[in-house]
Image (cartoon, helix red, strand yellow):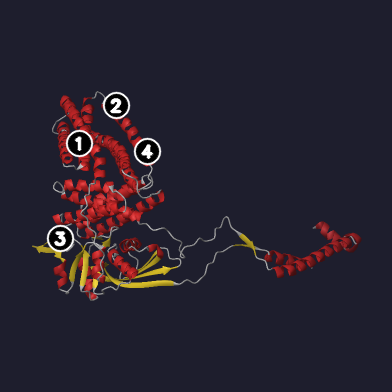
């Protein structure tokens, strides 16, 4: 009976058991979808070297309930470099060019290749073309193939391995092959082995290849394309209106804001140079100038540079190039301050104390200015530029102060003084940029989440472009300075993205510009390349203004690039590209779609706190209650009966004596 009673209690416990709620969602939705499949050439590494292969990319767009702009990618086999990044960018550019709100769609990219390919976003261009065709319902010309990265502004970026890709295109019957603008002539590293008198010599040399001539043996036409609109036309026969502009880059509002700063800095640079020259002349005999320590000559050379930059600043001001004037005046100020520091240092009785005091005062100054830049508020696209430029300069001042400490520990005092001079002037420029945006009317809204997301996106793009360029340039034995600069900028952006997200954004934009140009300019800078880059920057600035955003920084760098065309063509094209990137980021931020709920996303049940429910069948409850009551009554009766029995018949009456003795012993 006791077992029956316990079973009844157990049954009740099981029936009233609590279980955590598990969310399970099912349903049926109606989805519209369209699929486009394209060939994409790639390069694979085999035991015999590099060879061209053909990837097959299938793009499916879905539109319906629960679609929210998600991008899904499957690659087989896996690729070396993030294909997800190229797919996401393809969707972004496709939406921007077509004007279609991609947040109403979901996108699926399936990439299949016959062999593991060498990583690189070189399929970004054709992925974008396929996405546009799927969105618009356009048919693609299967006899056309393409290689080229896709940049956020829609331009087609440089790639490598083009001859091998043309070989692969021929294997599937391609008749036209699209390549990035400016890459008709590429280089291939050829290894030669010679045996002269038993001495084996192995040499490598770069051999130029004209791709049009190379492809002619297959009957393939090679066409250069500058942007995604050009590529879409060759694939589909449809075209988008190509933007162009005849608008003036430097507006009256920009000029009225920049001119007072240029005028003020020019006067200050002039006074600083005169003071530095006077101080140097009075103290130059105290500065060592031996064969092994030609310090006086070095300081005098810097003084000459200060004068040259001062004159350059005056010329730029006369030509109404006010940002160029401020930039050159700033360089003159650094040189003059260095001469001042060097003259004071070598005439000081206690040089160590002089440096200690200088470091202490500059550390305080740099810390204060960095705090101002870090805490400056960003509410829109205008303040983003001012704060971003200020943060970038604050970060540079901090780095320069750290480098000065390193030089001092090594006993390199002239470099120490130069970095201190740079840190001083760079910190002062923080305030200029925080104030200059006040002259313009704020436009657009920028919150911390949007800023961080945008900075992260462009940092990833910069890393991707740098990595890909590095792979290609290593193959041809090149390591241009632009690539090293891009790597350094990326490292700085990674360091600063938490504390200075605005600065990290602009560092990433500059890194992206230089990483791409490292490949584009491998065969040198030409007038055609400068003009083409200049035009694209001008268009980007005009497009930004049409959105109601004045791209102050882009205009500044555009103007500065104009002043560099004769002096340094490479620097000119870098600044034009940087200006284009800056103006383009405002278009990207302005056109960002609102995040929507997706049926592909959900939240699993939380382990703590957990919601519980009691699973009850009310008809069963009545039966269980009756059974429980019956078991309860039976249990009570059994307990009472057992107690009465023990009272009426104690153990000593009914247990034999021998057993009682046994229990006592044990």
**Placement of the C terminus among the 4 image quadrants:** bottom right
Q: Between label 1 and label 3, give the one nearer the viewer.
A: 1
Q: CA distance from mark 4 to mark 1?
A: 26 Å
User: In the depicted view, which residue is nearer to us: 462 or 187?
Assistant: 462
Outermost residue toward the bottom in this view: 173
Vertical relation: 139 (above or below) 358: below
Please state if 651 lies on the left or on the right of 558 as rendered. Answer: right
**Earlier sequence position, callout 1 versus callout 3:** 3
Label 2 – label 4 distance at C-alpha: 27 Å
Q: CA distance from mark 1 to mark 3?
A: 41 Å
Residue under label 3: 206
Other residues around mark 2 within 10 Å, as few (<14) / some (14–19) / many (≥20): few
Q: Quadrant of residue 517?
A: bottom left
In this picture, residue 133 sits left or right of residue 646: left
Q: CA distance from mark 4 to mark 3?
A: 50 Å
- Earlier in the chain: of badge 1 and badge 2, it is 1
Disc 4 and disc 3 in contact, CB within 8 angstroms: no
Q: Tell me which residue sits at (21%, 50%) in the image.
A: 248
| Residue bearing mark 2 | 353
Estimate how packed mark 1 is, as few (under 14), some (14 to 19) or many (20 or more) residues with alpha carbons within 10 Å: many
Secondary structure category for the residue under label 1:
helix
Q: Which residue in the structure is indicated by mark 4?
A: 371
Q: Are marks 2 and 4 in contact (CB under 8 Å)?
A: no
Instruction: Note whether residue 48 is visible.
Output: no
Earlier residue among tags 4 and 1 = 1
Residue 72 at what x, y percent from top left? 39, 65
Observer able to see residue 132: yes
């Amino acid at each position: 009976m006791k077992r029956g009673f316990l079973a009844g209690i157990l049954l009740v416990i099981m029936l009233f058991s609590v279980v955590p709620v598990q969310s399970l969602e099912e349903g049926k939705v109606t989805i519209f979808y369209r699929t486009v499949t394209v060939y994409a050439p790639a390069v694979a590494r085999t035991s015999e070297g590099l060879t061209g292969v053909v990837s097959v990319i299938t793009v499916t767009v879905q539109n319906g309930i629960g679609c929210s702009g998600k991008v899904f990618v499957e690659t087989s086999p896996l690729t070396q470099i993030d294909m997800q990044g190229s797919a996401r960018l393809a969707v972004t550019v496709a939406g921007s060019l077509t004007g279609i709100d991609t947040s109403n769609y979901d996108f699926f990219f399936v990439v299949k290749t016959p062999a593991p390919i060498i990583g690189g976003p070189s399929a970004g261009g054709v992925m974008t073309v396929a996405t546009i065709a799927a969105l618009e319902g356009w048919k693609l010309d299967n006899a056309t193939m393409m290689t080229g990265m896709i940049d956020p502004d829609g331009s087609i970026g440089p790639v490598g391995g083009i001859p091998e890709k043309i070989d692969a295109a021929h294997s599937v019957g391609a008749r036209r092959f699209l390549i990035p603008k400016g890459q008709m002539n590429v280089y291939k590293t050829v290894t030669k082995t010679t045996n002269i008198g038993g001495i084996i010599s192995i040499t490598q040399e770069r051999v130029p290849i004209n791709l049009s001539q190379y492809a002619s043996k297959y009957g393939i036409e090679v066409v250069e394309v500058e942007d995604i609109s050009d590529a879409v036309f060759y694939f589909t026969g449809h075209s988008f209106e190509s933007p162009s502009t005849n608008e003036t880059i430097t507006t009256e509002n920009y000029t009225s804001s920049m001119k007072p700063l240029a005028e003020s800095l020019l006067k200050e640079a002039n006074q600083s140079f005169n003071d530095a020259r006077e101080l140097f002349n009075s103290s130059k005999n105290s500065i060592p100038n031996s064969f092994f320590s030609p310090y006086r000559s070095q300081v005098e050379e810097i003084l000459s540079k200060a004068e040259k930059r001062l004159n350059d600043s005056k010329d730029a001001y006369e030509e109404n190039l006010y940002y160029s004037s401020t930039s050159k005046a700033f360089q003159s100020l650094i040189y003059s301050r260095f001469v001042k520091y060097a003259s004071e240092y070598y005439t000081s009785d206690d040089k160590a104390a002089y440096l200690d005091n200088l470091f202490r005062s500059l550390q305080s100054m740099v810390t204060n200015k960095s705090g101002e830049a870090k805490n400056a508020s960003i509410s829109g696209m205008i303040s983003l530029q001012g704060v971003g430029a200020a943060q970038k300069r604050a970060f540079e001042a901090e780095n320069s102060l750290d480098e000065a400490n390193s030089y001092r520990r090594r006993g390199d005092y002239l470099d120490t003084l130069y970095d201190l001079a740079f840190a001083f002037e760079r910190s002062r420029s923080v305030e200029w940029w925080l104030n200059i945006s006040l002259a313009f009317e704020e436009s657009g809204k920028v919150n911390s989440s949007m800023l961080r997301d945008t900075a992260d996106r462009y940092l990833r793009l910069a890393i991707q472009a740098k990595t890909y360029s590095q792979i290609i340039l290593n193959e041809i034995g090149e390591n241009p300075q632009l690539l090293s600069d891009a790597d350094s900028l990326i490292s700085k952006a990674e360091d600063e993205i938490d504390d200075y997200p605005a600065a990290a954004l602009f560092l990433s934009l500059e890194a992206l510009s230089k990483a791409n140009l490292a490949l584009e300019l491998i065969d040198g800078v030409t007038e055609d390349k400068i003009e083409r880059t200049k035009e694209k920057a001008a268009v980007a600035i005009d497009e930004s203004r049409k959105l109601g955003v004045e791209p102050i920084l882009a205009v500044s760098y555009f103007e500065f690039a104009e002043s560099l065309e004769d002096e340094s063509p490479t620097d000119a094209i870098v600044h034009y590209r940087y200006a284009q990137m800056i103006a383009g980021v405002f278009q990207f931020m302005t056109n960002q779609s609102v995040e929507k709920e997706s049926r592909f996303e959900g939240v699993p049940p939380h382990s703590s706190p957990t919601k519980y429910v009691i699973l009850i069948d009310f008809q069963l409850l009545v039966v269980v209650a009756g059974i429980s009551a019956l078991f309860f009554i039976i249990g009570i009766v059994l307990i009472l009966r057992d107690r009465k029995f023990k009272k009426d018949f104690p153990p000593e009456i009914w247990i034999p004596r021998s057993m009682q003795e046994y229990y006592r012993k044990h």
